[in-house]
Amino acid sequence: MDLVVETKELHKHFGSIRAVDGINLSVQSGEIFGLIGPNGSGKTTLIRLLIGLLLPTSGSIKLLGEDVPNKGILAEVGYMTQTSALYEELTVRENIAFFAEMCGRKDAAWMDEVIDLVDLQDRSHSIVRTLSGGLRQRTSLACAMAHRPRILLLDEPTVGVDPQLRAILWSYFRKLAERGVTLIISSHVMDEAERCDRLGFMRQGRFLAEGTAAELRSQKGAGTLEEAFLLLAAGGMDGGAQ
């Protein structure tokens, strides 16, 4: 598989706070990589660095072999924020079309496919402000995919949703990975970690450990990922993150 995301000794400091503190990350094409850790561990900062919204204090980032920040590769990257970035007076379909056109890739057939993928066929002409929180989450995911990105950066995409919708969203993520899309997904919910191909346990801006769920459990002789994380974190670390 091709290496599509790579960081080397990546740092982002806010004054004395080391929000990202020497992260080395490699993610392959078609892989689901989970950034797992509590709130404040540096997951959002790392994703913002990857998309180019923040400049690193030091270190390097490459997406698809190109240095970041780089406007030329933004059309290959989809980004779903924690909070909704939708236009509430537009319909679901109009929002998707807008985000696709922003990247110069409006394709009616693909929009239909994306709407089908997130099961919004019956609500595609609904005004966004009339939608429930769960339907907005689906719409946000569709907008992130609207331009056929090769990389999806999803920041806590299932926060605040019910267990049934969480399972539905993860089924979407797996379908995308099977199509060759690379996903980096942040979460503080440990049971979601089992759904990822590989994981990075984050705390205070660093990776405590990295590997498959089975490897991380085995590393500490733990029965669950939560237990493995707690055992790894028990060693103690300096610094802080946002």
Image (cartoon, grey):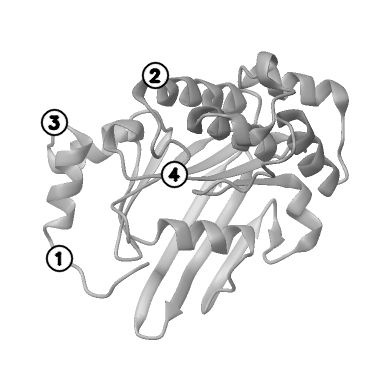
Q: Which mark is residue 164?
A: 2
Q: Which residue is nearer to you in this view: 171 or 198?
A: 171
Q: Kindly identify the amino acid type of the residue bearing the numbered disc 4.
A: Glu
Q: Can you identify the residue that label 4 sits on?
A: 156
Mark 2 burial class by Cα count in 10 Å: few <14, some 14-19, many 20+:
few
Q: Which residue is mark 3?
A: 223
Mark 4–mark 3 distance (CA, rounded to whole Å)? 25 Å
Q: Position of residue 112 (x, y in %)?
A: 78, 20
What distance separates the C-alpha of mark 2 from that of mark 1? 36 Å
Residue 148 visible within the image: no
Please name the amino acid that badge 2 sits on: Gln
Say if mark 2 contacts mark 1, CB within 8 Å: no
- Amino acid carrying label 1: it is Gly
Name the amino acid, label 3: Gly
Q: CA distance from mark 2 to mark 4?
A: 16 Å
The secondary structure type at the circle numbered 2 is helix
Q: Earlier in the sequence, mark 4 or mark 3?
A: 4
**Given this view, does label 2 or label 3 mark the residue nearer the observer?**
2
Is residue 73 visible in the rendered image? The answer is yes
Q: As rendered, which of 205 and 220 lies closer to the eye?
A: 205
Q: Residue at x 33, y 60 (%)?
A: 41
Q: Which residue is mark 1?
A: 236
Quarter of the figure with the N terminus: top right
Could you say whether the residue bearing mark 3 is in a helix, strand or loop? loop
Q: Nearer the viewer, mark 1 or mark 4?
A: 4
Q: Quadrant of residue 127?
A: top right
First along the sequence among labels 2 and 1: 2
Characterize the local packing of mark 3: few (<14), some (14-19) or many (20 or more) Cα atoms within 10 angstroms: few
